[in-house]
Image (cartoon, rainbow, N blue to C red):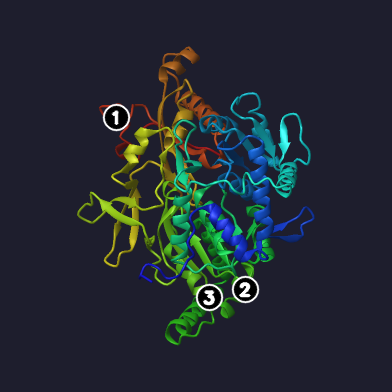
C-alpha cells in the first residue's frame, strides 16, 4: 500500500455495482435509522433499501422514464436517497435541486434540465404547485407524502407498491438495466442565478473514484453511524454523507432541523459527521462559554486540556473520552471523526476538538470534482491545511508568484464531464485534462496545501453556502432606480460571520423624474434604494440576502469590455451614504 493510501478499499465500477455489493455484504444491517410520525426510531436494513431501489426504478421505467431526467427536491430524508439510486442505477439522470430556491428559480432549472419528472416532499408542495402548467416537459409530479394519486400528482408510496408487484411478477427491466459508468447520470447545478448557474455533468466513474479515494485516507467502517446535516443536493453531503456511508456499510440518520440538533445527537449517537465549520465553531463556542461563566472555570478547562495532552502525547495514555465525558455525551457519546469542508475552519477549533478526543479533518473540493480533491488523513494531518491530494488525484499550482501562490488546478478520474450545454465555460475550466479551480493556494515542503484566496467572485459563508455576486446584482439591477451595483462578502468582526454587502450607484435621472425634482435629497435617494434592496431580497433565499449597502455617486471603474474591476472597487471607501438593513 502506497504512502497515500492508508486503508484497503473494495473496487466499485458504478453506484449500481456499489449497492449490489453492499446488499450482499451488509443485507441484514441497518442502512438507515429513521424516526416515525410518533417519534420512535426504526431501522431500514440494507436489503430493504435495495428492494425499494429496485421497486422504484422498475416503476419509473414502466412510467416511460427510461433515459429521462428526474429532478428531486426535498429536505434530507430516506425517500430522497431511494429516488436518487432508483434514477441513476438504470433509469436515467438525476437532477438534485436546492429546496431553498425561489419558485421562479426552481421553474427555470426544471426547464433548463429538461426534466421529465420531479419528485418532491410536502414541505415543497407550494413551490412545486406554482410551476403547474408552466413546464410542458414535466410528465409526472411525484409526491413523497401522498398516499394516493391525484389529477396532478402521483404518490411515491403507490409507485413503490406498483414496482414491488412488477418485480415479484418477474419484471427485470430495471434490475438488468446496463449502466454506462462514463456517461452523465448526475446533473448538478452550481449556486447562482438560473441564468448563471452551471449544470455540472457527473458520471458514476467520477463519483465512485472519489468515494474510493476518500475511504483510502480515513477509517470509516460498517460500525459507523452518521447524522446527516448538510442538504443532500450539495455534492459534498451526497457523495460523503450518503453514498460513501452506503459504500462502507454504515448507518445514516437525519436531523429534525438545526434547532433540534442537540436532541438528535443524543438520539442517534453518531460516530462520524460530515459538516461545515459553522456548526463545529458553534459547538466549540458553547463549550467555552459554559467554561467561561467564571474565570476559574476557563482556567480549569485549559489546565485539563494540558493534562490530557501530556497523558496522550507523552505517556501514550488516551484518557480524553473519560476526561471530557460531558462534551462527548452532549454529542451523543460516540463521536470520533468529523470531516469538514466548503469553508475554512479556525485551526484552534479543530485543535481543541482533537484535545477532546474527536478528530476534525479539513478538506477541499468542488462540485466539478465529485467533490473532494484534497484532504487531511486521519493519520497525517495539519490543522491549518486543507490536506494532501487524494490518491489518484494530481494537483498543480499554476502561475505561482514569488511566494509560491497561484491557481490550483486538478487532474484525475473524479473530474466532471463538463458543463451541460455550455461549451465556452467548459473549455475555460477544463484545459488539457486539467480543471482550473479559480482558487488560489500554495503547497508547503511536506506536500500539504493551503488556500489563500479566491480568484472567482463567489462569496462563501461560514456554513458553506456559495453566493454568486452576479446573482444578487442581477436582482438589484432590475430596479429602474439602480444604475449599477457591486456585491461582495464582508466579515462581521464580532461574530466572524460573512454577510452580503452591496455598493449601489443610483439611477439619479429616474429618481429625479419620479419625484419631479431637479435635485433629490439624500433621504429620498436612500428610500428609493432601500426599497430596491428589499425587493431584491424577497426574490432570494435568506442566506443570499443583502445585509448592508452603501450608495455612491459615481460609476465603477471598468475594463475595456465594460466589466467592473472588482479587485479595485470592492474595498473602496464609501463615497455617499450608507445604511444597515434590519
In the rendered image, residue 80, in percent from the top left (x then y), is placed at 63, 47
Find the distance from the CA under tag 1 to the CA under tag 3. 54 Å
Q: Mark number for residue 558? A: 1
Mark 1, other Cα within 10 Å: few <14 / some 14–19 / many ≥20: few
Q: Nearer the viewer, residue 68 or 396?
A: 68
Find the distance from the CA under tag 2 to the CA under tag 1. 56 Å
Q: What residue is drawn where x is 42% and y is 21%?
A: 507
Q: Earlier in the sequence, mark 1 or mark 3?
A: 3
Q: Say above or below: 155 vs 450.
A: above
Tags 2 and 3 in contact by the CB under 8 Å rule? no
SS at badge 1: loop
Q: Is residue 572 visible?
A: no
| Residue at numbered disc 3 | 301
In the rendered image, residue 343, in percent from the top left (x then y), is placed at 44, 53
Tags 2 and 1 in contact by the CB under 8 Å rule? no
Mark 2, other Cα within 10 Å: few <14 / some 14–19 / many ≥20: few
In the rendered image, residue 246, in percent from the top left (x then y), is placed at 58, 59
Residue furthest to the left in view is 402
Q: Is residue 238 visible?
A: yes
Which is more foreground, mark 2 or mark 3?
2
| Residue at numbered disc 2 | 326
Task: Look at the image and tell me in which quarter the N terminus lies.
Answer: bottom left
SS at badge 3: helix
Find the distance from the CA under tag 2 to the CA under tag 3. 12 Å
In the picture, measured across the screen, residue 391 lies left or right of residue 463, that is: left
Amino acid at each position: 500500500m502506497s504512502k497515500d493510501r492508508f486503508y484497503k478499499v473494495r473496487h466499485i465500477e458504478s453506484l449500481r455495482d456499489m449497492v449490489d455489493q453492499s446488499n450482499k455484504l451488509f443485507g441484514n444491517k441497518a442502512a438507515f435509522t429513521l424516526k416515525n410520525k410518533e417519534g420512535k426510531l426504526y431501522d431500514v436494513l440494507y436489503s430493504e433499501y435495495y428492494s425499494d431501489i429496485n421497486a422504484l426504478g422498475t416503476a419509473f421505467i414502466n412510467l416511460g422514464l427510461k433515459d429521462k431526467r428526474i429532478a428531486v427536491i426535498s429536505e434530507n430524508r430516506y425517500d430522497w436517497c431511494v429516488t436518487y439510486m432508483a434514477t441513476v442505477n438504470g433509469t436515467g439522470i438525476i437532477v438534485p435541486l436546492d429546496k431553498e430556491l425561489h419558485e421562479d428559480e426552481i421553474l427555470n432549472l426544471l426547464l433548463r434540465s429538461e426534466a421529465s419528472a420531479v419528485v418532491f416532499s410536502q414541505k415543497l408542495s407550494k413551490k412545486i404547485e406554482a410551476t403547474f402548467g408552466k413546464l410542458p416537459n414535466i410528465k409526472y409530479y411525484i409526491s413523497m407524502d401522498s398516499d394516493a394519486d391525484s389529477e396532478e400528482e402521483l404518490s411515491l408510496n403507490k409507485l413503490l407498491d406498483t414496482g414491488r408487484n412488477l418485480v415479484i411478477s418477474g419484471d427485470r427491466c430495471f434490475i438488468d438495466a446496463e449502466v454506462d459508468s462514463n456517461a452523465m447520470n448526475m446533473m448538478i447545478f452550481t449556486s447562482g442565478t438560473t441564468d448563471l448557474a452551471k449544470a455540472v455533468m457527473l458520471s458514476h466513474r467520477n463519483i465512485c473514484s472519489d468515494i474510493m479515494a476518500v475511504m483510502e485516507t480515513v477509517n470509516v467502517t460498517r460500525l459507523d453511524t452518521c447524522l446527516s446535516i448538510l442538504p443532500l443536493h450539495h455534492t459534498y453531503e451526497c457523495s460523503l454523507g450518503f453514498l460513501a456511508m452506503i459504500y462502507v456499510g454504515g448507518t445514516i440518520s437525519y436531523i429534525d432541523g438545526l434547532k433540534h440538533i442537540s436532541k438528535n445527537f443524543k438520539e442517534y449517537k453518531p460516530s462520524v459527521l460530515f459538516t461545515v465549520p459553522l456548526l463545529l465553531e458553534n459547538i466549540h463556542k458553547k463549550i467555552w462559554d459554559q467554561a467561561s461563566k467564571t474565570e476559574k472555570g476557563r482556567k480549569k478547562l485549559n489546565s485539563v486540556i494540558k493534562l490530557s495532552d501530556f497523558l496522550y502525547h507523552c505517556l501514550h495514555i488516551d484518557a480524553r473520552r473519560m476526561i471530557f465525558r460531558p462534551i462527548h455525551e452532549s454529542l451523543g457519546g460516540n463521536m470520533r471523526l468529523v470531516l469538514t469542508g466548503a469553508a475554512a475552519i479556525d485551526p484552534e477549533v479543530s485543535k481543541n476538538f482533537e484535545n477532546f478526543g474527536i478528530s476534525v479533518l479539513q478538506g477541499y473540493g468542488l462540485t466539478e470534482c465529485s467533490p473532494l480533491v484534497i484532504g487531511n488523513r486521519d493519520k497525517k494531518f495539519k490543522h491549518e491545511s486543507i490536506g494532501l491530494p487524494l490518491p489518484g488525484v494530481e494537483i498543480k499550482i499554476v502561475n505561482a508568484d514569488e511566494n509560491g501562490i497561484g491557481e490550483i488546478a486538478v487532474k484525475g478520474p473524479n473530474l466532471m464531464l463538463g458543463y451541460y450545454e455550455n461549451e465556452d465555460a467548459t473549455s475555460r475550466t477544463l484545459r488539457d485534462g486539467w480543471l482550473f479551480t479559480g482558487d488560489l493556494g500554495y503547497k508547503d515542503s511536506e506536500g500539504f496545501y493551503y488556500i489563500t484566496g479566491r480568484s472567482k467572485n463567489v462569496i462563501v459563508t461560514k456554513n458553506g453556502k456559495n453566493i454568486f455576486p452576479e446573482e444578487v446584482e442581477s436582482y438589484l439591477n432590475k430596479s429602474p432606480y439602480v444604475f449599477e451595483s457591486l456585491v461582495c462578502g464582508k466579515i462581521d468582526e464580532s461574530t466572524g460571520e460573512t454577510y452580503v454587502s452591496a455598493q449601489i450607484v443610483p439611477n439619479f435621472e429616474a429618481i429625479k423624474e419620479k419625484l419631479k425634482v431637479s435635485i433629490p435629497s439624500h433621504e429620498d435617494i436612500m428610500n428609493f434604494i432601500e426599497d430596491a434592496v428589499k425587493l431584491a431580497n424577497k426574490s432570494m433565499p435568506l442566506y443570499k440576502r443583502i445585509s448592508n449597502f452603501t450608495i455612491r455617486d459615481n460609476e465603477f471603474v471598468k475594463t475595456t469590455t465594460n466589466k467592473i474591476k472588482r479587485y479595485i472597487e470592492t474595498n473602496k471607501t464609501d463615497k455617499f451614504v450608507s445604511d444597515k438593513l434590519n
